[in-house]
Amino acid sequence: MSDLVAQAQQLAANLLDAPTLAHRWAHVQGVGQRAVELTATVEPHQRDLLVAASWLHDVGYAPELVDTGLHSLDGARYLQQHGFSPQLVGLVAHHTCARFEATERGLTDDLATFPLDDGPLMDALVTADLTVGPQGQRLDADERIAEILRRYPPESAVHRAINRAAPLLLAHVRRTLDRLDCTALDGGP
């Protein structure tokens, strides 16, 4: 395990491993494990970045970090203040089509201050997030989107954002799984 991944894993545990966040912590652990499985879909020099971002993607849910209510933005701001690379901070800021929720919350300009990577690295992070449920269980992306829509009421910003983003989210997952299939056919990374 690289220093970056170890640091990310430890920080996530420090912020999220609490009784009040048990489901969030289980989800994050599952996403971290899933990201390791998806590293073959990104360039070798990006693999640690993918895994680290997967461990950190939901730190903005930690009660002490909540500021705007947009967990991806709150987490990114915290990571930026603590010296993480702009690329990692941008991945956390924009993961799982956060721009849709930012629009719902009137935070588009705030989110836009972070770099958006919309290539294979973001595809893999979104896939890791959308193929792990709230208890850390493996789900397919359609099941995960349906689970999120059930958990948040229709009038919530999260529900409206995920509902609008669903086609793009599924496209991220489809591209990653296609890359994974191609890698398997080629004999691995």
Image (tube, rainbow, N blue to C red):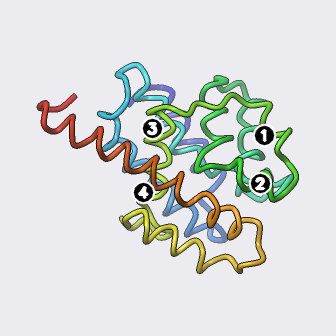
Residue 30 disc label? 4
Real-space CA distance between mark 4 and mark 3, rounded to the nearest whole angstrom: 11 Å
Q: Name the residue under label 2.
A: 70
Real-space CA distance between mark 2 and mark 1, rounded to the nearest whole angstrom: 9 Å
Front one among 1 and 128: 128
Disc 2 element: loop
**Quadrant of the rendering where the N terminus is positioned:** top left
Q: Position of residue 122 (x, y in %)?
A: 51, 38
Circles 2 and 1, Cβ within 8 Å, touching? The answer is: yes
The three-letter amino acid code for the residue at tag 2 is Leu
Q: Where is residue 41 in the image (x, y as percent from the top left)?
A: 33, 34
Q: Mark 3 points at which residue?
A: 51
**Residue 115 horizontal side relative to residue 186, left or right:** right
Q: Where is residue 106 in the image (x, y as percent from the top left)?
A: 88, 52
Real-space CA distance between mark 2 and mark 4, rounded to the nearest whole angstrom: 22 Å
Q: Mark 1 points at which residue?
A: 111
The three-letter amino acid code for the residue at tag 3 is Val
Point 50% across, 48% down: residue: 126
Residue 95 position by quadrant: top right
Residue 141 position by quadrant: bottom left
Crowdedness near tag 1: few (<14), some (14–19) or many (≥20) residues, C-alpha within 10 Å: many
